Image: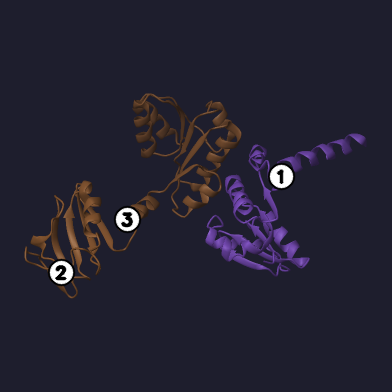
């Protein structure tokens, strides 16, 4: 079985931009969102496939070639849904690379013992603030 | 036993009541403030208002090391997160989740939830059980399972083939109400002869059911 699909779940600003960028570098991208109009955030250069539906439905995931996914990026606006989907991708479909965006750093503990990688906008912003603040003080 | 019950409305109320009578140590968590108060005053237990998918809620309510957690919210994903958080971070031994989508029963079990309940799934299982393992027997319960109706297909090598009903020593509590002999429907009398390929419609009681099936399927 060839794993060559790059799947993005959740077409918010982050998801849509990741999908666009990966599509630009030649990845075979499939983006899933519950709402049709979310795909407006995709840039014109996006040449992947859009799917409307509930990603917690396994049938939909399978229709989106989850079994052929080499990477899944999960960026819906609910941490609970994101963890749940990450667990499904990990335990049921053994997707080799899984990234998940989480607002609540506490929830990251549910990923312990897996290779699922979490992205915390909160931590990134905090670090950015600390860096910017130091730069100001250096002047 | 220390039991945590999260979410749910009337099912939570019902389970809290039943478990309280058994004198279990109950921790009840409900996000819906109004319903939390209702359960609390109705059953004389403390209810923690809060989101059970958050680790701090389970921590504040001292759910650590509980024997069982039962997740009853209407959101399958939330129930999953509650159960997994309970298991991995709070050392809760057994987790039970309600699911709305019957397809999630198998999935949740695969993901590590100990027990998954779906009313639709249970209903389907009951129907499947009642229509039995072998397709030659179908049963239907009537009057709160006090009466069962069995449908048994007669095969060539059964001992009662070509015998008159009056000559067969049936077990007690049996009534062959009807014989379906395609395309005819026969209301049997004592001198009716049973033939291969007949379908016997039998009224009986659940206790005698197995004995009757065994008797009828006895080979020559």
Q: Nearer the viewer, mark 2 or mark 3?
A: 2
Q: Nearer the viewer, mark 1 or mark 3?
A: 3
Which residue is identified by label 3? B127
Residue B187 image point, x, y percent = 10, 66
Do the residues at discs 2 and 3 belong to one chain?
yes
Determine the chain carrying the residue at label 2.
B
Residue B151 image point, x, y percent = 23, 61
Instruction: Give the colour in which the image draws chain B.
Output: brown
Residue B29 image point, x, y percent = 47, 32
> Residue lying farthest bottom?
B183
Looking at the image, residue A86 lies above or below residue A135: below
Secondary structure category for the residue under label 3: helix
Distance Cα–Cα, label 2 vs label 3: 33 Å
The chain coloured purple in the image? A
Residue shown at 58%/31% (left/top)? B90
Image-based side of B213 in relation to A52, left or right: left
Which residue is identified by label 2? B162
Looking at the image, residue A89 lies above or below residue A49: above
Determine the chain carrying the residue at label 3.
B
Distance Cα–Cα, label 1 vs label 3: 49 Å
Residue shown at 48%/35% (left/top)? B69
């Amino acid at each position: 079985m060839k794993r060559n699909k790059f799947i993005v779940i959740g077409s918010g600003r982050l998801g849509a931009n990741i999908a666009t960028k990966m599509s630009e570098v030649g990845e075979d991208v499939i983006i899933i969102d519950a709402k049709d109009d979310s795909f407006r955030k995709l840039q014109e250069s996006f040449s992947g496939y859009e799917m409307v539906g509930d990603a917690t439905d396994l049938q939909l995931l399978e229709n989106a070639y989850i079994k052929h996914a080499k990477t899944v990026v999960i960026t819906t606006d609910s941490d609970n849904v994101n963890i749940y989907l990450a667990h499904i991708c990990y335990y049921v479909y053994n997707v080799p690379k899984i990234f998940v965006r989480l607002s609540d750093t506490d929830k990251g503990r549910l990923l312990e013992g897996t290779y699922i990688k979490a992205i915390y906008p909160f931590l990134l912003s905090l670090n950015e603030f600390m860096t910017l603040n130091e730069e100001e003080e250096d002047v | 036993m220390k039991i945590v019950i999260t979410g749910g409305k009337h099912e939570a109320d019902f389970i809290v009541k039943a478990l309280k009578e058994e004198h279990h140590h109950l921790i009840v968590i409900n996000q819906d403030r109004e319903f939390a108060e209702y359960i609390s005053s109705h059953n004389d237990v403390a209810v923690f208002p809060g989101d059970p998918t958050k680790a701090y809620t389970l921590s504040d309510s001292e759910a650590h090391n509980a024997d069982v957690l039962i997740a009853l919210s209407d959101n399958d994903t939330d129930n999953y997160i509650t159960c997994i958080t309970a298991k991995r971070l709070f050392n809760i031994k057994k987790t039970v989740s309600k699911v709305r989508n019957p397809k999630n029963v198998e999935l949740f079990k695969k993901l590590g939830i100990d027990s998954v309940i779906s009313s639709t799934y249970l209903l389907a299982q009951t129907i499947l059980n009642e229509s039995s393992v072998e397709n030659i027997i179908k049963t239907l319960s009537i009057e709160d399972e006090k009466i069962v109706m069995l449908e048994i297909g007669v095969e060539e090598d059964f001992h009662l083939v070509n015998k008159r009903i009056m000559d067969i020593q049936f077990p007690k509590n049996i009534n062959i109400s009807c014989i379906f002999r395609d395309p005819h429907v026969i209301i049997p009398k004592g001198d009716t002869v049973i033939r291969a390929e007949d379908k016997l419609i039998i009224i009986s009681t659940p206790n005698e059911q197995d004995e009757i099936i065994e008797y009828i399927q006895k080979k020559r």
